[in-house]
Amino acid sequence: MPKINSEHAQYLHVQEAEGATPEEINQHWEWLEQNLLHTLPVFDNKEDIVSFVKGKIKGLIAETTSSKLAELEEEPEKFREALVKFEARFNFPEAEKLITYYSCCCWKGKVPRQGWLYLSINHLCFYSFFLGKELKLIIPWVDVQKLERTSNVIMTDIIRITTPSKERDFSLFLNIDEAFRIMEQLADVTLRRLLDNEIFELDPGLQDPTQITKRDLEARAQNEFFRAFFRLPRKEMVHEVLDCSLWTPFSRCHTAGRMYASDSYICFTSKESGCCDVLIPLGEVVSIEKMEDTSLLPHPIIISIRSKMAFQFIELKDRDSLVENLLQRLKQVNAGNPVYYNSLKNKDTTSPTFHSTSVFSNCESDSTGIVASQNSDGNDGGKDGGHLLNSEELRSNVAQPGTEEFRKFKERVKESLWNDHFAEYGRTVCMFRTEKIRKLVAMGIPESLRGELWLLFSDAVTDLASHPGYYENLVEASMGKCCIATEEIERDLHRSLPEHPTFQSETGIAALRRVLTAYAHRNPKIGYCQSMNILTSVLLLYAKEEEAFWLLVAVCERMLPDYFNHRVIGAQVDQSAFEELIKERLPELAEHMKDLTTLSSISLSWFLTLFLSIMPLESAVNAVDCFFFDGIKAIFQLGLAVLEANAVELCNSKDDGQALMILSRFLDHVKNEESPLSPFKNHHTFFSDDQEPCAVTEVADLIRDSYEKFGDYSVDQIEQMRYRHRIRVLQSHEDTTKQNVLRVVIPDVSIVPEDLEELYDLFKREHLISCYWDLTSPVIERHDPSRAYAEQYRLDHQQFTNLYKLVSPWTCGEHTEVLAERTFRLLDENMDHLIEFKGLACCLDVMYNGEMNEKIKLLYRLHIPPALTEDERDSQSPLKNPLLSTSRPLVIGKANGEAVDYQKQLKQMLKDLAKEKDAKMEKELPKMSQREFIQFCKTLYSMFHEDPEENDLYQAIATVTTLLLQIGEVGQRSSSSGSGSGEFTDDLQGEAAASDQDAVFNDTVKTPQKDSQSSPVAKGDWTVSLEHILASLLTEQSLVNFFEKPLELKPKLENAKLSQYSLKTNGMSYPSRGEQVKANSQ
């Protein structure tokens, strides 16, 4: 029996496992040794060791029990118990759906904390109660910047989660593969749903986040792999995955593998990578039959297709149910998608015809076997709705100069090899795809077969056959319509292979225009993206116009998902993954070039144009051949081969410009000596006379090296890399958005950049919190990554109010929400009921850093239209009537016994305002009515509540309010009578000099008369101006001190980070609980 360290053995005396055989017990013991033994030295005492081991094993037992129950029932009791604990511990709203949970350890330094990891639709949560200490962690998936499996000096298998401020390590899972897969899926779905909703579409089962289950996520992972491996449309969903064996006539045996049955396909891949893959569209299937079950052929079925081929599958479990389901789907496919087939004998017919892939089994080697939906005797093609469609490849319209006999001979040899291969492996989309065909593709597809094989490898031929008339209708609907996409298309038409004679004529340009415009009309989310013109030009050289359209559909929507959109996210993801491959496979180059940004920037065009823009055309089409057969894997490995071929020179390069020149020269001299095409003049690089001539590289040799040295990556490995790097790319875009918004806002505010960044994070998080739980509002749709940076995140009224309560220094108790509503209306200048970050930042800048006059002006604007409305809450006042009385004396004694004559102060104040009025350049604000002034006073009263100088402030505001009310009354009487000198004198003090008063108050009477045309206040109404209010407030030192005292934004931001979730989680208060739960930093 294995021995354990004697230092710890005496304390591990609790029975933790049992078994019927010594082997079973040893298996448990070995797991303990491998996973727990090396962590024990980090504990200080023996009791902690026992507690940790017992807690860990109990957690694993509970998890194992719940997993077994989950297999027996839809909602196991253990899961319900875990859900109750999750809700009690984290107090999220009901919309926060728990997906699954795992027992594991969270590392804090070198100490593991045993606990439970809860994975919900929007958050990763961890709870631990260990050694008397409670720990709660909340990490929103949208904050995750990196999710990876790694190791450290203590543990060999760790899941590490990186957020903007912290790394968290989790280990000791019972099933770490499953846990990581679910975490990966949740992070990918949530990030793309919230940050990449420009074109991202969820599977039907994931549309409602509250209904997502662990099983749904596992199904999504399987569907993603299935679609990526066979390069099928997004709508394809796997229904059955079964181990089986397929009869492979070329090897005269049954090949073990796995069958995938989806909505419209039956697919097979061998267990041995590259041995045999088969793709069978149900539209090609004639019959599906069960054969007699024998010992040599257990559970067999036969699938017959139209090209007189049959596929025999054996060892299929639950065969009867499988056949029943396949026949039902076959019936649906045949009923919903009629396909029109024709023989090549009818090739010259002028009637609209489509051919299924089965016609290739009998066609000649010099024909593509697929005709356009409308043919004619001439090269101009058929006419549909007035638009001429080309019925031949555009290269056939160009007279090729005479080529060398050697090249023609090489071409004939290749054609012969392909014909032999077709005879043995098939010539339809259902062909057996083996390592042999990969070698033929690497040698270069013959010109006469290139278009046909591109259609077969991409399965565009199925779309072509199942959509009769679709392209013609698109052309008819889209041509002649103007939009942004058509303008961009017109701009790029003459930049598409300008050196090729085909696109120096109107025939080629017109065909390119039709295909690109039709696709933009079909898929407005993508519309048109640069580089699509180059790719489509090459497709038109080797395929008929309609075939080129469906090839473009296959590339943009299946083979290069997310490449062709506003932000080219897909290309950047692969570009980032390419950097990882460089570090892994070319370590010396990566070590020399510490910053691989240059190489990744150069490689972006490789991915977007499939090397077509940087290699001679006759060589680049060979790379496209490999791409259509192997997908993006071919571009990855070819890129690595290019860098390896230039590794020495790149390591000796002195700067980025030299590295760029090295690669450009190399790629410009990749030749295809066997191509029957005449080399076209390239303009990729320019060289000075003193440069040495670059050695010529044969494209076939380069491609062969790429397969031999870097061809060992599987589709699954590439998809795993894409998951990891999509997180980084999306977060990089978010960082770019933030930096651009801050760059625009920083010059206009006095808030320090660090605090402004924190404020932006709070602003964005408020939007995201609404996306998490307010599923009925169109919050998610408001986030549009295609908009200007400043407009990507905007808050509505309720979101703004929540954030205002957290960050505003003007807290007014119950009145705060009213003030927040008015602030929102004031900032909503375009009346779209949404606020951008800049508006909030500028407003808070005034509140925290503004001068007194700026703060009073902001308060003033908050109490006049449009900020102030007739809302019922405006009339609710916490104030006492005496505060707004005009009967209070104007001579008040101060604390030191000194009496202040406010009449004299008022006269001097108004004189000063009259002198400064003409010098003002700023547009004067409307005067405030009495109702608006009362609301203004209510706000001030509320702001002073609980202030240390509360009593002095109340007394001061009472004095100022009384003064302003009397000013308004004087102005009202003066406006009504036309003169107010005598009346004002009687109201104030009889002994005051009448002449002085007349001079002062005659000015105040004239002011509202001058502005009466622009002011909404009627003549004779009670009014007071901003200048009156500001000057009156300046007479009270306590009020001046209140508005001029320095305010710190940082403490408010720190508190807001801790409590932002509490507004949505039923009063949850993080700061009061043990270790604080931080949604952003933990």
Image: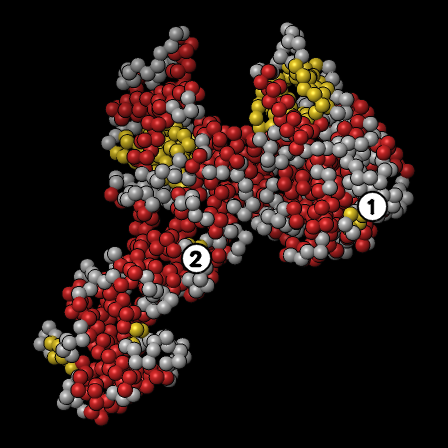
Residue 1037 picture location, percent across and down: 20, 72
Residue 907 shown left or right of residue 1060 in the figure:
left
Front residue of 831 and 1031: 831
Query: Residue at the spot x=37%, y=77% of the render?
Result: 1015
Query: Marks 2 and 1: in contact by CB < 8 Å?
Result: no
Q: Quadrant of residue 79?
A: top left
Amino acid at pointer 1:
Gly
State the SS at label 2.
loop
Q: Quadrant of the C terminus?
A: top left
Residue 163 picture location, percent across and down: 42, 43
Q: Is residue 137 visible?
A: yes
Amino acid at pointer 2:
Leu
- Residue bearing the label numbered 2: 834
Query: Residue at the spot x=62%, y=12% of the render?
Result: 299
Q: How many marks?
A: 2
Front residue of 332 and 80: 332
Residue 2 picture location, percent across and down: 39, 13
- Residue bearing the label numbered 1: 381
